[in-house]
Amino acid sequence: MLAASVSACAGADMQPYLPTAQKTKYAPETLFAASRDALEDNGYITTNADPEHFSVETREKETAVSSVPRLSYKYSWKVVTSGGTLAITSKCTKNSSMGREKFEDCGDERPKRLREEQEELREEILERAKRLP
């Protein structure tokens, strides 16, 4: 099962980011249902769930990197399953010790834990799709 949270990481350990795009044998409707269910079962609040366009997004979550100074990042997921392709992307913003209230885009990098969570999410969605009729 996917880790419930990426909270309290020892450090962000930023790494180059690549979205997931994997062609599958599953119908877009099956992947969409598996995606929505996997996100919701792992504590994400889904928004903009659009079965006609086979896409679902989550509400932004904030995760602490350290408590003193309060460093954190915010992220959300977007999963699109049109054409039987599982596409997972994340939006990410981070603050700094110089501006703890101001969040800026993570650019082409993501925290290591977020990249790992994306892979776990991909695996869980595919496993769920396998079990759906």
Image (cartoon, rainbow, N blue to C red):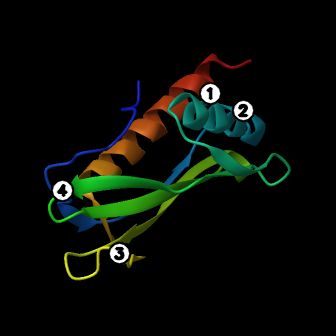
Residue visible at 21% across and 82% down in the picture: 98
Q: Residue furthest bottom?
A: 98
Residue labelled with disc 4 = 66
Mark 1 touches mark 2? (CB < 8 Å)? yes
Residue labelled with disc 3 = 108
Q: Split into 4 quadrants, where in the image is the N terminus?
A: top left
Residue labelled with disc 1 = 129
Q: Nearer the viewer, residue 69 or 9?
A: 69
Residue labelled with disc 2 = 30
> Mark 1 or 4 closer to N-term?
4
Specify the amino acid type for callout 1: Ala
Specify the amino acid type for callout 2: Thr
Rendered location of residue 37, percent (x, y): 64, 30
Q: Residue furthest right?
A: 52
Residue visible at 31% across and 45% down in the picture: 116
> Mark 1 or 2 closer to N-term?
2
- For marks 2 and 3, give the one nearer the viewer: 3
